[in-house]
Image: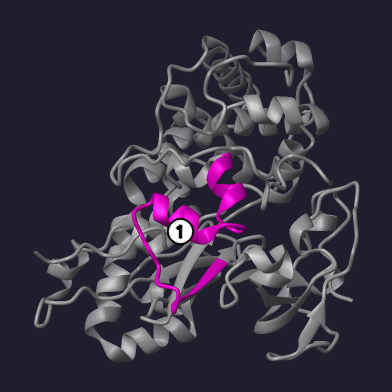
Amino acid sequence: MSSHHHDDSHDGHDHTEPPSDYALRVKAIETLLSEKQLIDRASVDAFVDIFENKIGPRHGARVVARAWTDPAYRQRLLADGTAAIAELGFGGVQGEDMVVVENTAAVHNVVVCTLCSCYPWPVLGLPPSWYKSFAYRSRVVIEPREVLAEFGLNVSAQCEVRIWDSNAEVRYLVLPQRPAGTDGWDEARLAELVTRDSMIGTGIARAVS
Amino acid sequence: MNSIHDMGGMHGFGAIERDEEDAPVFHAEWEKRIAGILACAAFNGLSIFDENRRAAEAMAPQDYLSTPYFGRWLHMIETMVLEKQVATAEELRSGHCATDGRHWTRSNIQPEQVLPLFQGGGSARAGVTTPARFAVGDEVLVKQINPAGHTRLPRYARGKRGVVQIHHGGFVFPDSRAHGLGDRPQHLYNVRFAARELWGAQAAAQDAVYLDMWDDYLQ
């Protein structure tokens, strides 16, 4: 079962058509565990629905927009990320213990999991392919500035880059800087500027043109 | 274990292929199914995250590298099903039940229970009775250890010095849990390592890497 599966998706980039081998093995284990009454297909469907529809970066964007507009909330978020995120109704698996780190003009934070793919599911959903890729996992800890430059982000020499390697069960979320020119904007409008990558730290919030 | 999954600081994997901001999280139907199956099986008590990670890490490096991400999830659950004697290799191959196998102790969760259970989660926090050895601001030295079993201590931090930034409190210990050896709860600290401590003069003087360190990892 662990023998070689020759396909062309070497790097966690699963864009290509998978070998039918995987589809067949998954079908086999789902059928088997269902027959043994150890999983329920409708429950599996419910988990898939969560992964596809019930969690994702729009949740994180709401947290960020709240922090940008409500200084007291921002303070609570930085002091106890889990509790402040729960105020907006978000929490659960892979987000039970959250720490939020704030980007400023002097500090730029970036999150990775070098050992696997740990990621704050309730606020960001499942991770994008690049986050799980061998290239990102291997490189961002040793050459963060080069990696950020590939993402189009040139961090100034004066700014400190902090890489948070999520090796335990604590999950990290970046609070990006609020874009200039957004004075007076409400939360809903601000949330649209908050990208997934800006909350991982490989991007910044969308600029206002 | 010192295997390929511990890839922080490695060279040779090339450029990062980015996908679009709103790219779907699954790229094939089988990826959706295995994600749902793994989550469902975990909630039903088949295995814990630490055991699943241990299973992925135990793949031969050449297999780990040539298996797509969700293929590694499939490998995790196949490994756990066999290891816990829930089914035989022949049953996995055929996809049909031929033996009784060992059943999980927890009940088979029903669809309406899924979302509340997911949103409830399960924190890895745990009470510890021993006082914390370190406080925020203390300098710490990471042990030079090379366990053959599961660990969450990356090679690049072993033997390095850092400064405690956060005391997270008590957390269960993956190195024992992954092998069914108990929770062994202990203090967990977030430690800042200067990039130059880890990588030498090539790193920017002001940059740093932050890692969570269980008490057992620290000298």
Which residue is located at x 34 percent, y 62 percent? Answer: A198
Asked if the stretch drawn in magenta spans residue B163, the answer is no
Element type at marker 1? Answer: helix
Label 1 crowd bin: few (<14), some (14–19), many (20+), radius 10 Å: some
* Residue type of the residue flagged with mark 1: Gln
Please state the horizontal and vertical placement of residue A175, each as a whole percent of the image.
37, 73
Please state the horizontal and vertical placement of residue A189, each as a whole percent of the image.
12, 67
Q: If the image is split into quadrants, where does the N terminus of chain A sit?
A: top right
The residue that disc 1 covers is: B119
Task: State left or right for residue B93 relative to residue B176.
Answer: left
Snapshot quadrant of residue B28: top left
Q: Is residue A93 visible?
A: yes
Does B100 appear above or below A61? Answer: above
Q: Numbered disc 1: what chain?
A: B
Does B130 appear above or below A52? Answer: below
Looking at the image, which is closer to me, A115 or B71? A115
Which residue is located at x 34 percent, y 54 percent? Answer: A152
Asked if the stretch drawn in magenta spans residue A137, the answer is yes
Snapshot quadrant of residue B46: top right
Does B93 appear above or below A107? Answer: above
Task: State left or right for residue B118 relative to residue B88.
Answer: left
Which residue is located at x 56 percent, y 78 percent? Answer: B206
For the record, the magenta segment spans A134-163
Task: State left or right for residue A14 relative to residue B37.
Answer: left
Task: State left or right for residue A208 relative to residue B14.
Answer: left
Please state the horizontal and vertical placement of residue A118, each as a whole percent of the image.
57, 53
Looking at the image, which is closer to me, A170 or A14? A14
